Amino acid sequence: MYFAGVDIGSTMTKTVLMDTNNKVVSAIKGPTGPEHRQLANEVMKMALEQANLQLDDISYIVATGYGRLNVPFADRQITELTCHARGVLSLFPDVRTAIDIGGQDAKCMKINSGKLVNFVMNDKCAAGTGRFLEILAATLGIKLEDLGDISLKSTKKVQISNFCTIFAQQEVVSRLSEGEKLEDIIAGLHDALASRVAGLARRLKIEPDVVLTGGVAKNAGIVKAMKENLGCELLIPEDPLLTGALGAAILAKERFSKATAKGEPIPTKPRRLEKATFFTKETS
Amino acid sequence: MLDKSKGLSKAREIYQNRSHRVKELKAEGKKIIGYPCMYVPLEIITALGLVSYRTYGDIAEPVTEADKALPTAFCPIMRTCLDCALKAKDDFLDGMVAIHSCDPQDKTTRVWQSYISYPYFHLIDMPGTLRTQSLEYFKGQLNDFKKTLESFAGKELPSDKLKAAIELHNRQRALVRELYKLTKPDPPLISGTEMLQVIKALMSLPAAEGNELLTQVISEVKERKDGPEKKPARLLIWSSTLDNIDIMQLFEAGANVVMDESCGGIRAYRADVKLTDDPLDGLSDYYLKEITCARTFREAVFGEARKDYIADLDSRFGYLKDFIRGWNINGAILFLVRYCDPFAFEMPSLKDYLDHLGIPNTYIEYDYTQGSLAPLRTRVEAFLETID
């Protein structure tokens, strides 16, 4: 038996297929783009191909992420907060605080007794999300994936006082013209992002083990800045992008097994990969 | 076949077309007095034969006109109220009574009055605390309001007429409380969405007609077989204004909202005006003390910094304990609107109190736009998943 988790994030869509032993048999990541309804099918097809499976082989499918309502073949929608918490817990059993920095949002989750117990999400603006780095990388004419390594070369962080992504751009340009070094400015930008996220996390009590996930966790400069701002060690998964989809797949298995054990039928959707052509309101 | 002329169907219809009745009454020669806040003593308006009408904004209407008159980083609720007024949505009003419950309200209504000059406008001042001098001052303010409204209405308001209006509005409060008793069962007999429509309808009708509607709704709900579905979570929503069913429906997608302590819910109906010799005593006492809005500074003991934090919290929020126990509430959402300082400052204390009572809770902020509904859905669902 196999289970699937589909995580449609604002920037990236991730799919994980898992067997009954919790072994990941395939994992696919792709940029979400504006048409995530169509993309969910594509990503699922690729995941099935990679594992040499058919959609009928999947006993239960959970969709998560902001696009979770637009996955017609998903049997259930669960929020990314619960899914990330579950995914992180499976990789790091002693986790108490999980921080996910995504393309367009940041979230902090408190985990206790095997489940999500509290959470906080940023809801003010792009500062403190991946978008901040994307925009600033473009401003500086540097590739996003190179930013982290450049920041690690810095010996003197330049403080960026503006929280707003747009105003930070202006500030960066003026600091450059003042003769500040590029790596020092970039280190300052990493610090700005980390301090925003750390501020968010501090609304919950930060307790170890602390795990960092999300695409932004692949940036070594951010990891360093987060450790400094939080004042603690951080654990990072091998693939920080997959924890949501992984958690969704695990929850799919748990829900399915629980219902089977109780002898209760669990409703599932038709196993067809149809393009969702319009947004349908969730019918309860 | 749904009878739209009474009960829940009528409430739904009024919710969708709120100004219909007051426009009819205006055509009959009645004067309509708008008010933006539940602290305004409606009894004085009713007693003088005028019709009170709560002004609201509209979450579906993008704010385009208010920006020329108001700062943008500002209470979105007052902004949308003014925006709708500037788009002539309240042009049937003959006057407006505002009250200094909070700064955005009194500042916005001044701007409002400068753009749209109603024949009648009055701002009632309201002290921030519940001290003895505060009550005296507030009574004086209500007396001033009574005088200017008498002048506008062209007649004096005798004490017995005011007392009769107080009894009429008390009857409404009692009926609302009776309706809320019907959310006690599991599942509740009436949903939060339906309740919101009823309360909003009450604010769009003369008091006597509101009472009639309530009586119909109560008997309809008692008999009904098609009530809300049972959900595992029974929620308390704590909010400033909660005036739109789109929001309520998001809460109710995965839960039963059995109590909403907001200005679109029980807040203005929780207690009754005491029948005092001088009716203004009863009115000033009720409106200042009994409306549990975060704008009021409540202290357990005057002048004494309370060393016992929990005792202080209990003196401020203890009335919620009755709701939680009586309605078997197992979760609470503290629902804040952006830039609302009074509620934002009150929230951490309330959170501590709910934690102390062992009630799972979360706070969520929105900005009164359609765009804020999707993130709201995620946060509500995630919270319900934690208490699942």
Image: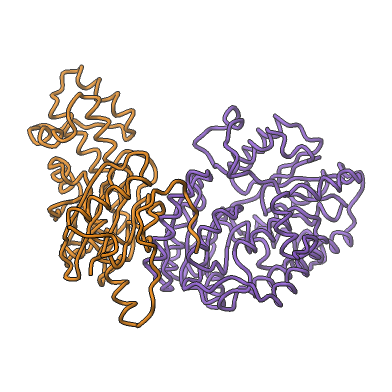
Chain colours: A orange, B purple
Residue A39, percent from left and from top: 32, 45
**Image height check: is B77 above or below A280?**
above
B353 left or right, relative to B368: left
* Location of residue A18 by image quarter: bottom left
- Res B86 seen here: yes
Of all residues, the one furthest to the bottom in this rendering is: A262
Residue B198, percent from left and from top: 69, 61
A153 left or right, relative to A106: left
Most foreground residue, B195 or B273: B195
**Image height check: is B31 above or below B266?**
above
**Image height check: is B227 above or below B55?**
below
- Figure disc tally: 0
- Res B137 seen here: no
B36 left or right, relative to A221: right
**Image height check: is B151 above or below B213?**
above
B83 left or right, relative to A163: right
Residue B251, percent from left and from top: 51, 60
Query: Which quarter shows the N terminus of chain B?
Result: bottom right
Most foreground residue, A284 or B139: A284
Most foreground residue, A182 or B226: B226
Which residue shows up at 47% across the image and 52% down it?
A: B344
Query: Which quarter shows the C terminus of chain B?
Result: bottom left
Which residue shows up at 54% across the image and 62% down it?
A: B302
Residue A4, percent from left and from top: 27, 61
